[in-house]
């Protein structure tokens, strides 16, 4: 008595083929749109001479961190080193990819997090999906994404969003749930309706937690850059991947350190932005 | 703070919405994998199309599975680095109705198992004898490659007591480099043309049963429909081939020089082999 193997893989392959057949025209159109947005962002960043970009970035870091000298100096020196190593255009391309992926992840993730905080049903639906998103190996959906989003950056954004969105959802939900019940009662006593309570009380109080989630999203997006290089995302991840395939350890580490520098700058700046005044 | 964040996001979306229309450039896209042979040929094709024919060409380095998938879906126009009949057979089977093979750019490619020249083993059949010296391991590459499928078969055919290790092209060359540095015995799954044969003194092990296949050739594969959309490009890719393996290895050797720029070397190739290049453009 042998139980035949359940054809799970076949079912998935057939459904993916079906989706490609009937959905890819829509995803392709979306992909063209997102691709041109990314091009615009990247071209705009590339249009600035590197020294000017670095100065602007340092000034932004100074302003956003409310005058932290350390972070400002780190931005100046770190980006200067990247420029000096000849990784400038790769870095700009990676920063553009990470920013756009993060924006997409937040604009989908925050509403979902709010919904999960406000309704038990939504919470029960969302949580298992998040578990899958965070644990399903990216390699599994990397290649199947090509027929939908084409080769290159848009497919990379898609897989990065899947990987990096969960913390934004989880921490938005957590932040709202952690608002003290006394304050909620107080708001209700003053006759505020559900939306007023959300926007005037819960979201402002949850902001530090939400910012921590956004910070995590950025960091996870950066950790995907090498994997997305496998489908032609180029950028710093592409430099790393190229170097390891050619056994050039030095170049690999240079590009790797570039990723670390970008990550540390973004992390520190976002932490300061999220911190309570 | 949150208000400001929302404002920034809205602004970004509005700017994006304004910027969207009319940015799709009509350009040729060619996918490749970061192997030396592939990178050399792809840069050469890019240089000819750009310098000689006035096209705009984007070359995209990806994983092998992604490259085939992208030509199959028509997302890229083609590639010049299909290892057939064996290495990429699995990939080709997946997309064979959607692509067109324009024939080889070079023959004489080979698959096999290689050892440093100081290793006493001469044939795959000898490996069991020396299993301990090799630490009981054969160093392999990406599990998806045809070379690995054949290597698994070879382990069975020769009834080897060694284990075939999976990894990637990079881990294989790293293991090889490390073994040679320490003067240890090592056997790796290999293919040529590959830069490791230029860098170290290696030899292929004899394969009396012929499990690892005969000669491979490297082919040009394009998406179905390229002949209609871009007949000029199609005609060029159809004619594109090296005069012989030596010509290709010359180009690859230039790329191995420190600080080499592949695109510049491709332009140098156009300068140094004008008859070959002209024969593609006739």
Image (cartoon, coloured by chain):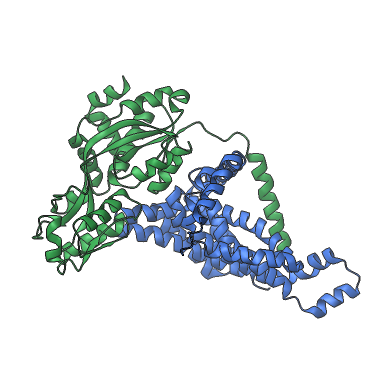
Chain colours: A blue, B green
Q: Find the residue positioned furthest to the front.
A: A1
Question: What residue sits 66% from the left and 49% below the top?
Answer: B12
Q: Position of residue A144 (x, y in %)?
A: 50, 49
Q: Is residue B159 above or below residue B274?
A: below
Q: Position of residue A6 (x, y in %)?
A: 51, 58
Q: Answer yes or no: is residue A67 visible.
A: no
Q: Is residue B66 above or below residue A226?
A: above
Q: Nearer the viewer, residue A95 or A36?
A: A36
Question: What residue sits 49% from the left and 58% below the top?
Answer: A138
Q: Position of residue A24 (x, y in %)?
A: 58, 41
Q: Is residue B100 above or below residue B2?
A: above
In the figure, residue A167 lies in which quadrant?
A: bottom right
Question: What residue sits 20% from the left and 60% below the top?
Answer: B159
Q: Answer yes or no: is residue A169 visible.
A: yes
Left or right: B226 as drawn, with respect to B196: right
Question: What residue sits 58% from the left and 52% below the top?
Answer: A100
Q: Find the residue positioned furthest to the bottom.
A: A182
In the figure, residue A132 lies in which quadrant?
A: bottom right
Q: Position of residue B6 (x, y in %)?
A: 71, 57
Considering the image in quadrants, where does the C terminus of chain A appear?
A: bottom right
């Amino acid at each position: 008595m042998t139980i035949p193997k359940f054809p799970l893989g076949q079912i998935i392959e057939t459904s993916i083929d079906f989706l490609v057949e009937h959905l890819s025209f829509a995803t392709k159109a979306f992909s063209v749109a997102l691709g041109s947005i990314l091009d615009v962002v990247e071209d705009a960043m590339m249009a600035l001479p590197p020294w000017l970009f670095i100065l602007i970035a340092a000034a932004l870091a100074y302003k956003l961190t409310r005058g932290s000298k350390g972070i400002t100096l780190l931005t100046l020196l770190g980006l200067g080193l990247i420029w000096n190593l000849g990784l400038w255009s790769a870095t700009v391309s990676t920063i553009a990819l990470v920013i756009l992926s993060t924006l997409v992840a937040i604009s989908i993730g925050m509403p979902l997090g709010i919904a999960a905080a406000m309704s038990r049903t939504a919470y029960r639906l969302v949580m298992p999906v998040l578990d899958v998103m965070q644990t399903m190996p990216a390699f599994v959906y990397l290649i199947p994404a090509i027929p939908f989003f084409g080769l290159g950056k848009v497919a990379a954004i898609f897989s990065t969003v899947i990987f990096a969105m969960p913390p934004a959802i989880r921490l938005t939900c957590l932040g709202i749930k952690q608002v003290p019940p006394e304050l909620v009662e107080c708001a209700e006593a003053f006759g505020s309706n559900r939306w007023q309570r959300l926007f005037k009380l819960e979201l402002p109080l949850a902001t530090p937690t939400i910012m921590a989630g956004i910070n995590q999203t950025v960091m996870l997006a950066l950790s995907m850059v090498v994997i997305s290089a496998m489908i032609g995302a180029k950028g710093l991840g592409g430099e790393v991947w190229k170097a390891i395939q050619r056994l050039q350890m030095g170049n690999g580490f240079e590009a790797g350190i570039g990723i670390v520098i970008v990550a540390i700058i973004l992390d520190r700046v976002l932490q300061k932005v999220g911190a309570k005044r | 703070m949150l208000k400001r964040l929302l404002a920034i996001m809205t602004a970004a979306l509005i700017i994006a919405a304004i910027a969207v229309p009319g940015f799709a450039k009509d350009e040729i896209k060619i996918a490749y994998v970061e192997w030396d042979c592939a990178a050399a040929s792809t840069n050469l094709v890019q240089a000819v199309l750009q310098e000689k024919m006035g096209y705009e060409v984007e070359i995209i380095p990806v994983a092998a599975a992604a490259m085939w998938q992208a030509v199959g879906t028509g997302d890229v126009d083609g590639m010049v680095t299909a290892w057939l009949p064996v290495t990429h057979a699995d990939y080709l089977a997946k997309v064979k109705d959607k692509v067109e093979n324009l024939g080889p750019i070079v023959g004489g490619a080979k698959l096999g198992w290689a050892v440093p020249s100081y290793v006493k083993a001469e044939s795959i059949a000898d490996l069991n004898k020396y299993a301990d010296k090799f630490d009981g391991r054969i160093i392999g590459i990406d599990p998806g490659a045809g070379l690995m499928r054949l290597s698994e078969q070879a382990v069975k055919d020769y009834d080897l007591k060694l284990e075939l290790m999976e990894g990637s092209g990079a881990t294989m060359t790293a293991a090889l480099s490390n073994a040679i540095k320490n003067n240890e015995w090592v056997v790796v799954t290999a293919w040529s043309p590959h830069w490791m044969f230029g860098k170290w003194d290696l030899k292929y092990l004899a394969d009396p049963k012929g499990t690892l296949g005969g000669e491979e050739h490297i082919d040009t594969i394009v998406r179905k429909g390229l002949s209609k959309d871009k007949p000029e490009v199609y005609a060029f890719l159809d004619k594109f081939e090296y005069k012989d393996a030596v010509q290709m290895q010359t180009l690859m050797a230039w790329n191995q020089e420190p600080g080499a720029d592949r695109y510049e070397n491709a332009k140098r190739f156009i300068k140094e082999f004008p008859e070959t290049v002209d024969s593609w453009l006739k």
